[in-house]
Image (spheres, rainbow, N blue to C red):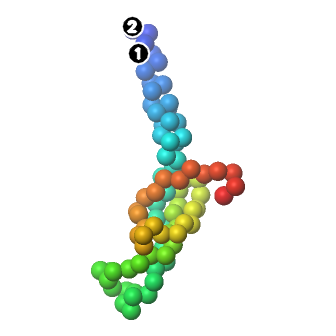
Amino acid sequence: MRYAALFLWLAVPVGVWFAYEAWGTPHAIWEYEFRDNGDPYNPVAPRWYTSCTFVGWTGVVMVPAVAGQCPWVRFFKMTGNQ
């Protein structure tokens, strides 16, 4: 039983690998585009976002906004053809 503790540390890298395979890597919002609502510099004016650019460990990803919104963090799986 005491030898089992020697392999307990393997749970962390295996868990990180499983999370990467399931969700991808986190990317934070870097830039966005939105439709002009007549008051572009008012931070509380309602905006309809059209595209979102995210930056993460594996690079930059530009995607269209979902229902006019850009989340602060998204997870992306990077493939060889992006």
Do we see residue 31 in this rendering? Answer: no
User: Disc 1 and disc 2: Cα gap in Å?
Assistant: 7 Å
Residue at far right of view: 81
Residue 73, percent across and down? 43, 58
The residue carrying pointer 2 sits among few (fewer than 14), some (14 to 19) or many (20 or more) residues within 10 Å by Cα, namely: few
Residue 59 or 45: which is nearer the viewer? 45
Residue 69, percent across and down? 41, 70
Residue at far left of view: 44
Residue identified by numbered label 2 = 1
Residue identified by numbered label 1 = 5
Instruction: Count the numbered circles shown.
Output: 2
Q: Quadrant of the C terminus?
A: bottom right
Residue 10 drawn above or below residue 34: above
Residue 32, percent across and down? 48, 73
Residue depicted at x 47% and y 18%:
7
Q: Which mark is residue 13?
A: none
